[in-house]
Image (cartoon, rainbow, N blue to C red):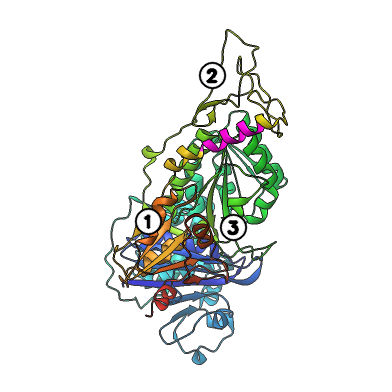
Amino acid sequence: MNHISLKIAAPAGFGVMSMGPMFAKVLKRAGYYVMGYPEYPSLIRGGYNSYQLIISDEPVYNPYKKTDILLTFTKLSFEKEDISKDLTVIADFDKLKLDKNNIDAKIIDLPINKILKENNLKEIVQNTMALGYLASYLNIEFEVFEKVIKKTMPEKHHEINITALKLGYDLCNDKITNSFETKDYNDYVILTGNESAALSAIASGVNFYSTYPMTPASSVLHFLAKYTKDYGIIVKHTEDEIAGVTMAIGAAYAGARAMTGTSGGGFSLMVEGLGLAAITETPILFFISQRPGPATGMPTWQEQADLKFVLNASQDEFVRAVFTPGDITEIFYAVNEALNIAEKYQIPAFVLSDKYLSESLFMDKSFNVNAIKIERGFIFDGNANNPLEFFPRYKEFKDGIPQRTFPGTIGGIHKTPSNEHDEFGFVSDDAKVRKIQQERRFKKVNSLINDMPQPKLYGDQTADTTFVCWGSTKTALLEAMKYNKTFNFIHFPAVHPINWKETEALLKSSNRLVLIENNFLGQLGQVIAENTGIIIKEKFLKYDGRPFFTEEILEYLGE
């Protein structure tokens, strides 16, 4: 296939996490398809940061293990990366104090430090200069990169960066040869999963977001905070996750469309609040971006191991909706659907992402904002004839769902306790009341199933092997499918509640089932077994903190 795998590497604090996305924008504007995958340790300074960009003239869904071009600012690259004759290494070898003659790779020695000193430029622009060389090497016009700098950087930094950029361009006397066909990608977006979730929240009418920041969900908070005035959103960086969830519940009770976000460790603290939302039937959306655990685990790495936690969190039993989108487009629409379902059914709803999907950069067709709907469910508007009458807040209105009303509504007086309660909200431990209320709440599931996205088959229905996956493993399978057509896969964009009878039939129609997940136990496989009796014996599981790379799928298939 026609692609180039480019990796930029440097210590933490060097700006790699800014260089990668900026250069991706340059590539997109130059007419290339690009996806980006970052890796970084939980360090403010030092360590080893890298940003991989896969460049092509066709859609790219997933990263690769193999690197073709390495632009590095650290000696650690020669320990961390697979240095081979196929690799082109671009670096300032004098500054790194390395003998380039001892490195078994194609070497491009950039005397960045020397040129900066000769031109009285600060070391801080060495990144821009190196990217200038790289852009010229990849046949990207100077003006394309110049426009990106002017759009993404403050005006006071334009002159020095454009000067450094030009120096980098002028250094390049050799250009790579490729058969890429450049295209117009103006109608495509280039976003991370978290940016997609935040954009959907804005388009879906979220007007209250509260949480304590926790990697890898933090950038949802940061993104929404930028647009509080533009879209009338209250964004609260709370003192902890407990305050984050309870503020969101309070806002939803008062009539806001509310959302919170965190990772597994933060959600552990939110669980008591989850139970409060459930019994008070207060709609709230949880955006959970997973990372390895337990406890602090590996804060900046990849895993999909919170599925069963989210499905079973909090005491006792209650109705919830759990979405597991596999790409930025699915995230965008899942956030909207989950918000509508939370308010329609007056339940907690979840959208599960993970480090890889949340922070990697993807391109896709621009989202259809006109497809976004805002459905707030059954709301009691008031009764002026009986302004002081108690309102049966927890009485079935339709399909087990009651009407809800907001504080201050005329004739909408009711109580909202965390205890079991009757239809007016008065606390009760009466056996009959408990039975009526619990059965009414679970009655919602009958219609909720029909509103949830169902598992979908990708590829040839008669394929020899069928992978079964959820969440972001979808991208690795889509990329591997370019090379190997002997497999298909079933992706779960939601896990609960779904139509298990139809799902069982879909699974049984396959020849050879292989469970593929980023966790140790195969949690989706356990859920499938619980609901269908189907035990998927063959498992391809990964739990080293990294996503599935494209080659790993092909190697599993024997290639």
Q: Which residue is at a point 29% across and 56% down the rendered structure image? A: 184
| Residue visible at 30% across and 70% down in the picture | 485
Mark in front: 2 vs 1? 1
Which badge, 2 or 1, comes first in the chain's sequence?
2
Q: Is most of the magenta stretch helix, strand or loop?
A: helix
Q: Are marks 2 and 1 in contact (CB under 8 Å)?
A: no
Q: Is residue 353 magenta?
A: no
* Amino acid type shown at disc 2: Asp
**Can residue 532 be seen in the rendering of this structure?**
yes
- Where is residue 404, by image quadrant? top right
First in sequence, mark 2 or 3: give its number.
3
Residues 373 and 179: in front is 373
Q: Is residue 308 above or below residue 3?
A: above
Amino acid of disc 3:
Asp
Residues in magenta, as a range: 434-444
Numbered circle sitting on residue 381:
2
- Residue that label 3 marks: 306
- Left/right placement of residue 66 relative to residue 292 reads left
State if disc 3 and disc 2 touch (CB < 8 Å): no
Label 2 crowd bin: few (<14), some (14–19), many (20+), radius 10 Å: some
Q: Is residue 34 above or below residue 260?
A: below
Query: x%, y% of residue 323?
Result: 49, 49
- Find disc 1 in the rendering and name its residue: 505
Which residue is more in the foreground, 145 or 268? 268
Q: Is residue 443 magenta?
A: yes
Disc 2/disc 3 C-alpha distance (Å): 39 Å
